[in-house]
Image (tube, rainbow, N blue to C red):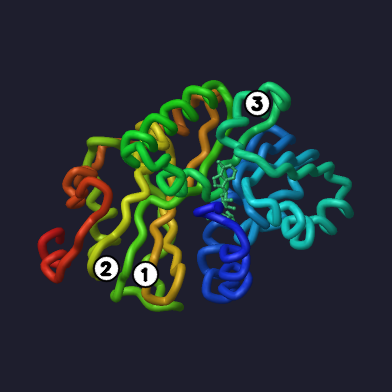
């Protein structure tokens, strides 16, 4: 059984289209700000592309997608196929383990950029029974980043998820915002976001805070997975070949580090004192 996809995912995604639409709009805005230089896309773990804007896909000449889920390709075609065909875009969808296949896919598509579409946050759910999720995820992420080195790539993934009471649909805050991924650095805005969410009980750490290296521009996006269970998504795009003074992010702000987000081994527990203690 696929712990991060399958028919249950499709049913939930189809039924939640309205609830998820503000998040889809943020994803659309983020993708709109991403200007891949490559005209070929390797799309990994996109399921049916439930939250992907067709218009962004139309910027490519070819798309090669892979997902573990055998239903995903058919549903992707149902959602995006007609527009891709009308625009003359060649697309191909395979069922398979895109992470295990990554070296082969990169060799087969040497000029394609890569989008990991809400896939890396699921890594921990695929930890083999005999391994620790933290060790497994950290080793896999290091390996994936090594494999992608020198390639233009991006990822949208879960950072944290859990029950929240401070957010309501249609509310302006939290909204997507720009920040910079900085391990071991301070992140005051992140704390403010979590405080506003009024997190309750246990939040799950998706173990993805090491996906982007220091200095990568990232977009944080709030996602009401259900009205009282929220995800904090992070999106970023890595363009290794371009170095320009203007694009160098300002890393001079203060804030709080991940270790100060009350990170327990695999989850984060919040209580009512959270609001005040981090302001
Ligand atoms: C949370 S869903 C994301 C769905 C997608 N972003 C969307 O908008 O519908 C995660 C997807 O990643 C896929 N997945 C997880 N691990 C994978 C892997 N190693 N290779 C390929 N697909 C994978 C799952 O099958 C699932 O479809």
What is the residue that sits farthest to the front in this orientation? 130
Q: Position of residue 166 (x, y in %)?
A: 29, 74
| Placement of the C terminus among the 4 image quadrants | bottom left
- Who is closer to the viewer here, 120 or 8? 8
Q: Is residue 15 left or right of residue 201?
A: right
Q: Could you classify mark 3 by the number of other residues whose Cα lies within 10 Å: few (under 14), some (14-19), or many (20 or more)?
A: some
Q: Could you classify mark 1 by the number of other residues whose Cα lies within 10 Å: few (under 14), some (14-19), or many (20 or more)?
A: some
Q: Secondary structure at mark 2?
A: helix
Q: Is residue 276 left or right of residue 38?
A: left
Q: Could you classify mark 2 by the number of other residues whose Cα lies within 10 Å: few (under 14), some (14-19), or many (20 or more)?
A: some
At x 50% / y 24%, what residue is drawn? Answer: 243
Q: Would the CB of label 2 be found within 8 Å of ligand 1? A: no
Q: Position of residue 153 (x, y in %)?
A: 57, 34
Q: Would the CB of label 1 be found within 8 Å of ligand 1? A: no
Q: Position of residue 195 (x, y in %)?
A: 23, 64
Q: Earlier in the sequence, mark 3 or mark 1?
A: 3
Measure how far apart labels 3 and 2 are at the Cα level. 41 Å
Q: Earlier in the sequence, mark 2 or mark 1?
A: 1
Q: Position of residue 210 (x, y in %)?
A: 36, 36
At x 28% / y 54%, what residue is drawn? Answer: 190
Tell whether label 1 touches label 2 (CB within 8 Å): yes
Residue 133 shows in this picture: yes
Q: Earlier in the sequence, mark 3 or mark 2?
A: 3
Q: Would you name the residue on which mark 3 appears?
A: 106
Say which mark, if any, is on residue 173: 1
Measure how far apart labels 3 and 1 are at the Cα level. 39 Å
Measure how far apart labels 2 and 1 are at the Cα level. 8 Å
Q: Would you name the residue on which mark 2 appears?
A: 196
């Amino acid at each position: 059984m696929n712990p991060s996809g399958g028919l249950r995912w499709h049913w939930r995604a189809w039924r939640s289209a309205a609830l998820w639409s503000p998040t889809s709009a943020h994803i659309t805005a983020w993708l709109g700000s991403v200007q891949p230089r490559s005209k070929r896309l390797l799309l990994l773990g996109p399921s049916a592309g439930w939250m992907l804007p067709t218009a962004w896909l139309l910027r490519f000449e070819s798309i090669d997608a892979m997902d573990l889920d055998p239903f995903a390709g058919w549903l992707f075609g149902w959602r995006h196929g007609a527009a891709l065909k009308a625009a003359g875009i060649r697309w191909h969808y395979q069922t398979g383990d895109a992470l295990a296949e990554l070296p082969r896919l990169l060799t087969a598509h040497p000029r394609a950029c890569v989008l990991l579409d809400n896939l890396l946050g699921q890594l921990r759910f695929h930890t083999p029974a005999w391994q620790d999720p933290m060790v497994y995820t950290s080793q896999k992420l290091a390996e994936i980043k090594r494999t992608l080195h020198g390639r233009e790539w991006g990822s949208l993934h879960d950072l944290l998820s859990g029950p929240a009471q401070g957010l309501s649909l249609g509310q302006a805050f939290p909204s997507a915002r720009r920040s910079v991924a900085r391990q071991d650095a301070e992140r005051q805005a992140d704390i403010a976001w979590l405080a506003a969410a009024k997190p309750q009980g246990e939040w799950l750490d998706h173990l993805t805070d090491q996906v982007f290296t220091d200095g990568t521009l990232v977009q944080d996006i709030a996602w009401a997975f259900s009205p009282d269970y929220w995800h904090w998504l992070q999106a970023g795009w890595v363009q290794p070949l371009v170095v320009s003074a203007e694009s160098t992010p300002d890393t001079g702000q203060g804030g709080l580090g991940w270790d100060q987000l009350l990170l327990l081994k695999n989850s984060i527990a919040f209580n009512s004192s959270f609001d005040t203690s981090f302001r």
